[in-house]
Image (tube, rainbow, N blue to C red):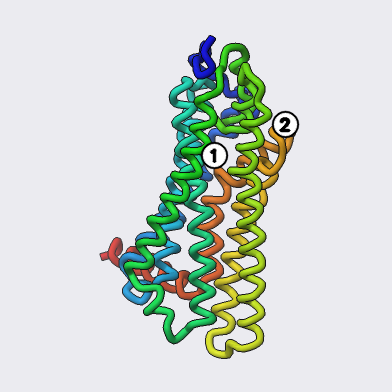
Amino acid sequence: MEKNSTAVTEFVLLGFSQNPRIQSLLFFFFLTVYSTTWLGNLTIIVTVIITPSLHTPMYFLLANLAVVDISESTVTSLKILWDLFSHTHTISYNWCIAQIFFFHLTGGAVVFLLVVMAVDRYIAIYKPLRYLVIMNRGVCIGLVAGSWLGGFAHSIVQIGIIIQLPFCQSNILDNFFCDVPQLIKLACADTYIPELLMVCNSGLLLTLIFFILLVSYTVILVKIRAHVTEGKHKALSTCAAQIMVMSLNFVPGMFVYDRPFKVFPGDKVASVLYSLLAPMLNSMIFTLRNTEMKSNVGKIIRKLLLFKRT
């Protein structure tokens, strides 16, 4: 058999439970999560677009994060909802590879966009007079495009390694979607080098970025507490929200990817956190902790209610 050939044409996703009643409950739970993700992030996108006072670099980046969050959630949610509804838990080899590609594309874009948002806050705090000059529209668009390109580069490396592996025996994936840690263990070959490359490309990179961001936000918070007088509460609240979102996206991912790929019972819970719950909670955190966003969302809701009455 050639190294890149495969006898496996589809994989079986074990999911969370084979009990039909539990599957029905999980269907409604994940449907609620996915619907809330769309509602919350779409609210942010629409609010930023139609509110002139929110046409600033920070809210432009926030709206783009909302777009990525919807995309990331869709990659996994549609498949799991279909499986739970139809009670079919198989995925073809090609669709499995495609799901891995889009999952890591959007996940990588989220990571790099969170880095960009940290840079945005750093410039806003340390260079307030030149902030709008530095973070002009062209720069913002370039940074968002760069985030997507970074996600693409990260994802294409994952796929490049995976498609070189032969799959010829077991096709049982102990997960609710296709991802590298479970898939790589099914290969009919020595996976030591591929696992090492995967850990470096996902786990170590994720950890490095996380600690760099943690140090950056610590520096920003020190600056705010020591020197910023006007709008201190707003700046602290914004940074706190970004730190919460960063931790929610990074920590579960580090648990899954920052070690040799062994299946642990907590892997599925961590996967749910960063692939399904994080995209939903990101919008809630940014909306509830941002007075300006809450105020404008409230205005839009009141206008819609008045429009319906008339």
Task: Please determine whether, in this image, residue 172 is positioned above or below residue 228.
Answer: above
Q: Indicate the secondary structure of the residue bearing disc 2.
A: loop
Which mark, by number, is residue 30?
Answer: 1
Q: Measuring 58% from the left and 84% from the top, which residue is drawn there? A: 232
Q: Is residue 298 visible?
A: no
Q: Quadrant of the N terminus?
A: top right
From the viewer's perspective, tell me whether residue 77 is left or right of residue 305: right
Q: Indicate the quadrant where residue 14 lies.
A: top right
Q: Quadrant of the C terminus?
A: bottom left
Q: Nearer the viewer, residue 131 or 54?
A: 131
From the viewer's perspective, tell me whether residue 241 is left or right of residue 261: left
Q: Measuring 50% from the left and 74% from the top, which residue is drawn there? A: 291
Q: Which residue is mark 2?
A: 262
Q: Indicate the secondary structure of the residue bearing disc 1.
A: helix
From the viewer's perspective, tell me whether residue 192 is left or right of residue 101: right
Q: Measuring 38% from the left and 55% from the top, which residue is drawn there? A: 145
Q: Position of residue 118 (x, y in %)?
A: 54, 67
Which mark, by number, is residue 191?
Answer: none
Determine whether label 2 and label 1 are within 8 Å by CB: no
Q: Position of residue 80 (x, y in %)?
A: 52, 31
**How far apart are labels 2 and 1 at the CA level?**
26 Å
Q: Position of residue 296 (x, y in %)?
A: 41, 71
Please tell me which of labels 2 and 1 falls first in the chain. 1
Q: Nearer the viewer, mark 2 or mark 1?
A: 2
Q: Is residue 244 visible?
A: yes
Few, some or many residues within 10 Å of mark 2 (<14, 14–19, 20+): few
Q: Nearer the viewer, residue 258 or 73?
A: 258
Amino acid residing under circle 2: Lys
Amino acid residing under circle 1: Phe
Q: Position of residue 70 (x, y in %)?
A: 44, 48
